[in-house]
Image (tube, grey):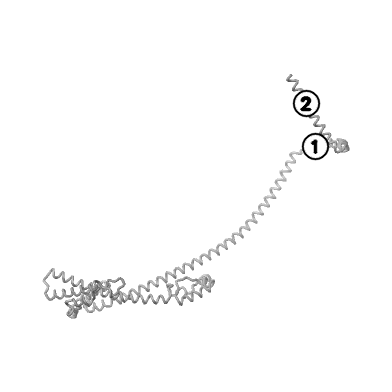
């Protein structure tokens, strides 16, 4: 239990910063923990500075608004294209009243003029003073034959576009809410529910982000728990290793003592065996007859006059020593002369044999 308590991590640091600090790390490195505490007031949980995070969020919000405006314009543009395309298809299949044809023709020309106005600004840096062929929006609008009828066209066109968009929103909402039965609801109620689709999707997105964040926290907690268990396991293995070594050395000492005592007893027994063998060899060697013979030899040796011979040898050595140091050289020279005489005798014999 004490080991688990030591591994408890400082909750604020691990939640506010992308780090994993255990209680043991905090105890060993207090200055580092102070540094991390200071950084936690300046950094987010992702490791980015709070000022930079604020700028990024503002830029994302600005981009979101710009993107929403662009998507709205794009949705209206594509809806107008589909509206004109449906009219062309119906015109091929059946007779269309002239007034309706004039209306769609005016819408097509106004849409074409608006597209051309968008293509005027062709500069890479988006400068408005540089336009295609030097034309301006005002010049194109003045050449639009329906510029005076724009309000009446919009008054008739807006309901058509709204109706088409309502149907699509209802279809998308029905696809999203496939589990619920919307066919029994009135059209206005269906559209009212469909108009809440952005809020529903935003809420679901936030829920998914929250679940993702919770999942990341759970994963981080799991990793921390894994490392805690891993450290505890290492400590347990170290303790087991120490215990095993202690008991092993203790048992080894006892085993060595037993072996030593056994070797001593075996050595004593071997020494006794050697003595017994020695006694047997002596008994086999010195029998009664052998002992009697040895005694007789001893008596004979004791009766031999070794002392007189010893005295004679000593006197001869003293006589040699009394002659002096030159006697040794004379003896060596005499020996050489004797050797030379023998060699000459041998040479004469060999010569006589050859003759």
* Callout 2: SS: helix
Q: Residue at x 49, y 74 (%)?
A: 36
State left or right for residue 215 relative to residue 253: left
Q: Residues within 10 Å of mark 2 (few under 14, many from 20)?
A: few
Q: Position of residue 183 (x, y in %)?
A: 22, 74
Mark before the other along the chain sequence, 1 or 2: 1
State left or right for residue 133 relative to residue 264: left
Q: Residue at x 29, y 71 (%)?
A: 123
Q: CA distance from mark 1 to mark 2?
A: 52 Å
- Which residue is nearer to you in this view: 151 or 141? 141
Q: Is residue 13 visible?
A: yes
Residue 344's disc number: 2
Q: Is residue 307 visible?
A: no
The image quadrant of residue 136 is bottom left
| Residue picked out by circle 1 | 294
Q: Quadrant of the C terminus?
A: top right
Q: Position of residue 34 (x, y in %)?
A: 51, 75
* Callout 1: SS: helix
Q: Residues within 10 Å of mark 1 (few under 14, many from 20)?
A: few
């Amino acid at each position: 239990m004490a080991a688990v308590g030591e591994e408890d991590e400082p909750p604020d640091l691990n939640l506010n910063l992308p780090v994993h600090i255990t209680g043991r790390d905090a105890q060993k490195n207090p200055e580092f923990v102070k540094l991390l505490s200071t950084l936690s007031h300046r950094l987010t949980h992702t490791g980015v500075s709070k000022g930079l995070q604020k700028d990024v969020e503002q830029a994302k919000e600005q981009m979101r608004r710009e993107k929403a405006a662009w998507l709205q314009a794009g949705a209206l543009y594509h809806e107008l294209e589909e509206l004109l395309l449906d009219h062309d298809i119906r015109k091929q299949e059946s007779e269309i009243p002239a007034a309706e044809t004039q209306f769609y023709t005016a819408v097509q020309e106004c849409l074409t003029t608006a597209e051309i106005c968008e293509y005027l600004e062709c500069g890479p840096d988006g400068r408005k003073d540089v336009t295609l062929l030097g034309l301006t929006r005002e010049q194109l609008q003045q050449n639009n034959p329906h510029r005076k009828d724009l309000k009446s066209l919009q008054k008739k066109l807006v309901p058509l576009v709204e109706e088409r968009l309502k149907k699509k929103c209802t279809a998308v909402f029905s696809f999203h809410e496939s589990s619920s039965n919307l066919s029994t609801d009135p059209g206005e109620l269906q559209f009212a529910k469909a108009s809440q689709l952005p809020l529903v999707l935003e809420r679901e997105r936030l829920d998914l982000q929250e679940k993702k964040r919770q999942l990341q926290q759970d994963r981080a907690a799991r990793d921390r728990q894994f490392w805690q268990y891993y450290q505890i396991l290492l400590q347990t293995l170290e303790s087991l290793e120490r215990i095993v070594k202690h008991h092993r050395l203790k048992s080894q000492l006892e085993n060595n003592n037993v072996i030593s005592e056994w070797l001593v007893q075996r050595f004593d027994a071997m020494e006794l065996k050697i003595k017994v063998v020695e006694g047997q060899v002596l008994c086999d060697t010195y029998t009664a007859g052998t002992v009697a013979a040895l005694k007789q030899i001893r008596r004979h040796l004791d009766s031999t006059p070794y002392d007189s011979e010893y005295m004679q040898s000593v006197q001869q050595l003293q006589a040699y020593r009394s002659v002096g140091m030159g006697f040794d050289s004379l003896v060596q020279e005499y020996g050489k002369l004797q050797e030379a005489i023998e060699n000459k005798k041998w040479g004469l014999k060999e010569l006589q044999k050859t003759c």
